[in-house]
Amino acid sequence: MARKYRDDFASQDVESEPVICSLCERVIPNDQIEGHHLVPKSKGGKIKVPLHRICHSHIHAAFTDAQLAKKFSTISAILNDPAMQKFVSWVRTKPPGFDDEAEERGRRR
Ligand SMILES: [Zn+2]
Ligand SMILES: [Zn+2]
């Protein structure tokens, strides 16, 4: 079976088709593509989905590896979480290349 993507989502030769974020379903700029293991690698997970860097770090900020492996090993389970729904509807109002680093600094307690 031919594989469409290599393991490395950030490979340079993906100009043919835009990569879509599994969480917020927006196009991901090349420099923000990160692969997320639906079941964490440490728990034996193999399936990877492409996510924005910001979406990816939000998932890991919200859930522990144990939670991801047990309850949130599918995108639909993650999207069922009220806090995630809030994040996704918020991030969808941002440009695709949006990165919240500046905001993170301001939000630090
Ligand atoms: Zn991840
Ligand atoms: Zn995203």
Image (cartoon, grey):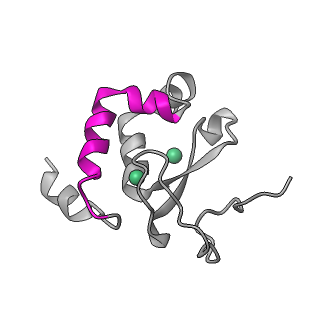
The residue positioned 41% from the left and 56% from the top of the image is 26
- The residue lying toward the viewer, choosing from 101 and 78, is 78
Up the image or down, 106 lies above or below 68; here it is: below
Spot the residue most to the top. Answer: 70
Instruction: Please give the count of numbered marks on the rendered protein.
Output: 0
Q: Where in the figure is residue 57, as x and y percent of width and height?
A: 40, 49
Spot the residue most to the front. Answer: 16
- Locate residue 96: give its quadrant: bottom left
Would you say residue 39 sits in the magenta stretch?
A: no
Left or right: 66 with respect to 9?
Answer: left
The overriding secondary structure of the stretch rendered in magenta is helix
* Magenta span: 75-95
- Locate residue 29: give its quadrant: bottom left
The residue positioned 56% from the left and 30% from the top of the image is 73
The residue positioned 51% from the left and 33% from the top of the image is 65
Left or right: 24 with respect to 67?
Answer: left
Q: Where in the figure is residue 17, as x and y percent of width and height?
A: 58, 68
Left or right: 3 with respect to 33?
Answer: right
Q: Where in the figure is residue 108, as x and y percent of width and height?
A: 16, 51
- The residue lying toward the viewer, choosing from 80 and 66, is 80
Q: Where in the figure is residue 28, as x and y percent of width and height?
A: 45, 63
Would you say residue 79 sits in the magenta stretch?
A: yes
The residue positioned 33% from the left and 35% from the top of the image is 84
